Image: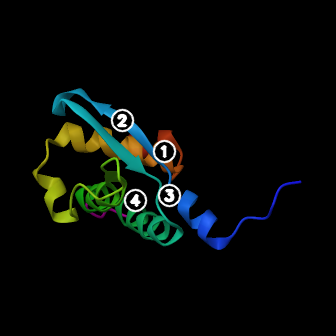
Amino acid sequence: MSMGLSKEAILLKSFRKEKLSVPEWGGDVYIRHVSGKQREAVQSQAKKVKDGGPEMAFASELLAMCLCDESGAALFAPDEIPTLEGAMIERLALHCVKVNGLGKQDDIEKN
């Protein structure tokens, strides 16, 4: 018979991450699954984009939340993301959306 989970055990497993190879950078990064609060912030930013808001603000917030190293530490602050190559930002943002199940892939690729 299995034992019930404690809050601590659940919190330790809550923030999964997935390795992503980035050959352009010569290595791997990790894409972290966002928290419920972060998810709400990303969805709010996505709605602004849909209503004509800046796409870079959405991508910057998303990548700052999701891109991390192996230990889970954030790699970039939101204001650093726009300094990266545009095509790289788009590719990484799409991967973050997919990993986090943040929307229909077809809708996101249209924007």
Res 20 label? 2
Above-or-below relation of 109 to 41: above
Q: Earlier in the sequence, mark 4 or mark 2?
A: 2
Secondary structure beneath dot 4 equals: helix
75 with respect to 30 (left or right):
left
Q: Are marks 2 and 1 in contact (CB under 8 Å)?
A: no
Q: Amino acid at mark 2?
A: Leu
Secondary structure beneath dot 3 equals: loop
Q: Residue furthest top?
A: 23
Secondary structure beneath dot 2 equals: strand
Q: Residue furthest right?
A: 1
Q: Which residues are magenta?
A: 50-54
Q: CA distance from mark 3 to mark 2?
A: 16 Å
Q: Which residue is mark 1?
A: 99
Q: Which residue is mark 3?
A: 15
Instruction: Nearest to the eye among marks 3 and 4: give it.
Output: 3
Residue for point 83% across, 55% down = 2
Q: Earlier in the sequence, mark 3 or mark 4?
A: 3
Colour option used = rainbow
Instruction: Nearest to the eye among marks 1 and 3: give it.
Output: 3
Residue 34 lies, in percent from the top left, at 46, 60
Q: CA distance from mark 3 to mark 4?
A: 28 Å
Q: Which residue is mark 4?
A: 50
Residue for point 42% across, 70% down = 41
Residue 64 lies, in percent from the top left, at 28, 59
29 with respect to 16 (left or right):
left
